[in-house]
Amino acid sequence: MKRTFTRVFLFLWLTLSTLAAYAQGDALLAARAAISNGSSRDLAQYFATTVELGFDGDKQSYSATQAEFVMKDFFAKNASSGFEYIHKGASPEGVPYAIGKYASKSGSYRVFVKMKSFNGAIKIDTIEFTKE
């Protein structure tokens, strides 16, 4: 009985860990595609209820709707010519993040994307753009 319980527990733990990793990866991949395409609408689907946006060190918190308009303005002024992740990872607490490079005609930016779990879904908590 104890052996069966241990096996079931281990199986469930591995399954949930795998699902969490896939959810994290899917959200980061979707965010990458939206940023690469310069689509504030697609990106906003992954925003938490409040999002911290930073541009060259100037950070502010916005509602998801406001953040969509701020990103729309940024993409209009800095049309995307490509975006790729350089590094993906997670903090010791399990908070997924990614660092990437955004290229536009007006220059390139280093991008930091941090996600958090909100009501069981992985959502974007922070995006920072720093001009290189």
Image (cartoon, helix red, strand yellow):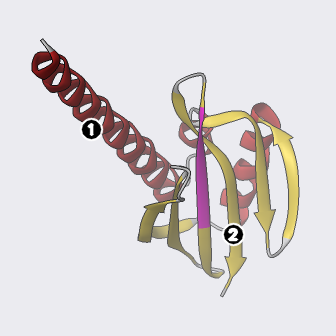
Q: Is residue 111 above or below residue 22?
A: below
**Which quadrant, please, contains the N terminus?**
top left
* Numbered badge on residue 18: 1
Q: Give percent across and percent down for residue 13.
A: 28, 31
Horizontal side of residue 64 vs 124, given as left or right? right
Asked if 128 appears above or below 52 in the picture, the reply is below
- Write the residue at 52% across / 69% down: 99
Q: Give the alpha-carbon distance from disc 2 to disc 1, as whole Å.
A: 30 Å
The question of residue 110 being in magenta is answered with: no
Which-is-in-front pick, marks 2 and 1?
1
**Residue range of the region highlighted in magenta in the rendering:** 112-117
Side of 32 relative to 114 (left or right):
left
Residue type at numbered disc 1:
Thr
Q: Is residue 116 magenta?
A: yes
Q: Which mark is residue 129?
A: 2
Q: Give the mark, 2 or 1, whose residue is nearer the N terminus.
A: 1
Q: Residues within 10 Å of mark 1 (few under 14, many from 20)?
A: few
Residue placed at 31% from the left, 29% from the top? Answer: 16
Q: Amino acid at mark 2?
A: Phe
Q: Residue at x 75, y 34 (%)?
A: 64
